[in-house]
Image (cartoon, rainbow, N blue to C red):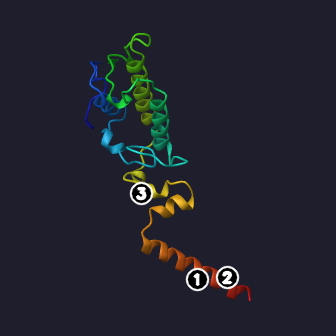
Amino acid sequence: MAGVAPHSIHKRQKRHILQMCELIAQHTNRGCLDYNNYGCFCGLGNAASHHVDAVDGCCRVHDQCYGNVYCYWIYPQFVGYNVDCTSEPCRCTDSPLSSPCAYSTCQCDLQFAQCLARADYNHAFSNYDRTTCLRGPRARRRHQSRRQRRETAKSQWRQITFQKKRLS
């Protein structure tokens, strides 16, 4: 998908999550897997209070957008939609009145692809360690092994002991 030429997605019929990948490829010349596990919000799951950069911010907004789509019992990721990219900019062609779920899902994906196109991709946030995204020290601590917690405690104890000696 990374080599998709601009405007190669002309008129697409309903095909679910692959449509988002095609829109991303068209707008960014990157495959959607490049964005999987990027930062704190791109890919499955998110447990962060902040995004790490503009790309991650796009993923956060996209997650929120999907959260506002009402599709009865179906997740937006599984909703197909019609999109027309024969001219710039692409547009969602489902009716917001007769197909509100498809239309809203398309709008979320299209805005997401446009947002990613404006953002700079930083390889440092690819396959990012999500434990650094967790809120607060307690949440971070849950994901540490017993050995890591023991080493952290020893290090903190050494710092406190050193500071006490220094003050004496």
Q: Residues within 10 Å of mark 2 (few under 14, many from 20)?
A: few
Q: Residues within 10 Å of mark 3 (few under 14, many from 20)?
A: few
x 48%, y 49%: residue = 47
Q: Nearer the viewer, residue 110 or 16?
A: 16
Q: Earlier in the sequence, mark 3 or mark 2?
A: 3
Check disc 2 and report the residue beneath it. Answer: 163
Decide: is 30 above or below 81: below
* Alpha carbons under labels 3 and 1: distance apart: 27 Å
Which quarter of the figure has residue 84?
top left
Check disc 1 and report the residue beneath it. Answer: 158
Kindly tell me whether residue 95 is visible in this rendering. yes
Kindly tell me whether residue 89 is visible in this rendering. no
Decide if residue 76 is on the left or right side of residue 165: left
x 48%, y 30%: residue = 65
Check disc 3 and report the residue beneath it. Answer: 129
Q: Position of residue 58 (x, y in %)?
A: 47, 37
| Three-letter amino acid code at the position of disc 2 | Gln
Q: Earlier in the sequence, mark 3 or mark 1?
A: 3
